[in-house]
Amino acid sequence: MNLLQIFTFLFIAFMMKAINCEEGTLEKLTISGASRVEPVPQGRSYANRGYYDVTTECSVGTECTPLQHCTTMVYEVAKMCYYGDKSFFCGASGDEVPYVCCPSNPLEKNQICGRTLVQGQFYRGLGTYPFIARVGFKHINTGGFAYPCVGSIIARRVILTAAHCALAKAEGHRLSSVRVGEYDTSTDPDCASTGFCAPRSINHAISHVIVHPDYKQGQYHHDIALLILKTPLNYSVATQPICLQKTRANLVVGKRATIAGWGKVSTSSMRQPEMSYLDVPLTSWDLCLRNYANTGALESPGSIDGQWMCAGGEGKDVCQGFGGAPLFTQENGIFSQVGIMSFGSDNCGGLRVPSVYTSVTHFVDWIQDNTPTE
């Protein structure tokens, strides 16, 4: 049984009132959505609660929360509970609804990120990269939409993209919405060759934009922004959040990463209606310096060490239409975003001509600090 099957099994068990730690069977941690739960003082256990009456104090950065409000912990709790380990519990409500020490950050609290619901080692079709979103600009007269940029889903109301995309001024168009659940732009709904169809793609209106305060139009430093949606996304096989890379530890030169979106790829003469992807190597920063030092793109008073990363240079690359797209890796079945497409060369796809990405690791604290609670 692979990890996805295990997770699916445990999640179904959870939703069907399934886990009993006391007996080591899947029976009791289940939570009725109709249950009313009283608030719990942050960082404190909830006293006088039967089997879940434990003395665990939640550590800094976590808070005692009903498990139903902390879906990111379901898998770990189910696994530890099976072996009788109650260390995740900090108490329970009067009707035996368990409380766990849950991450306080909204990016980590209510989602299980970086997973795809489809399987297959070599499959790259519908649902493979469900965290990719299209950034939509609406024509002020005709009402038609253009999608010149890409972003990534990181929370139910938050899309991560490049600042130059969020502030783009397309003639006659205005930033309007984000389209999620898309794979093939020529069909709706999208269907796989097996006959399976995903839910229809949806345009979600943007409430407001949070651009890094140090970004300046026409320059490339601090090229990062958050698009905050008016309404939360409904996750599906084609709409899921991606995890954020928090450390540079394994981001070494030569490591393979993937970028995906609906722009033009250098190996094709035109854009394709299906989502395109390209695997590229992480390259040394010196290679980017040699390519872009004379352009002035990397030289400005606002430039800071570590805010960019370099990838590509194998004689193929993504070109127009990929601005703001995520650069991501996959480890143990989990996708993590490491970069945001910022800029590249006019000689797109040239040998030893990489592209420049905003480093997610460098800005992960800013992202988390500016992500609204759900």
Image (tube, grey):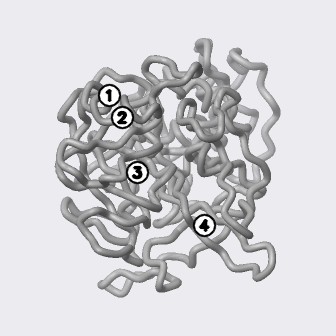
Helix, strand or loop at mark 4: strand
Task: Identify residue type, mark 4.
Answer: Arg
Task: Identify residue type, mark 3.
Answer: Arg
Pointer 3 residue: 115
User: Which of the numbered marks, if any, corresponds to residue 179?
Assistant: 4
Label 3 crowd bin: few (<14), some (14–19), many (20+), radius 10 Å: many
Residue 281 in the image: state x and y as whole percent: 22, 41
Residue 62 in the image: state x and y as whole percent: 62, 21
Answer with mark 3 or mark 1, whichever residue precedes in sequence. Answer: 3
Q: Nearer the viewer, residue 285 or 13?
A: 285
- Does residue 125 appear to the left or right of 57 in the view shown? left
User: Which of the numbered marks, if any, corresponds to residue 292?
Assistant: 2
Q: CA distance from mark 3 to mark 1?
A: 34 Å
How many numbered markers are drawn? 4
**Is the Cβ of the residue at disc 2 closer than 8 Å to that at disc 1?**
yes
Residue 103 in the image: state x and y as whole percent: 59, 27
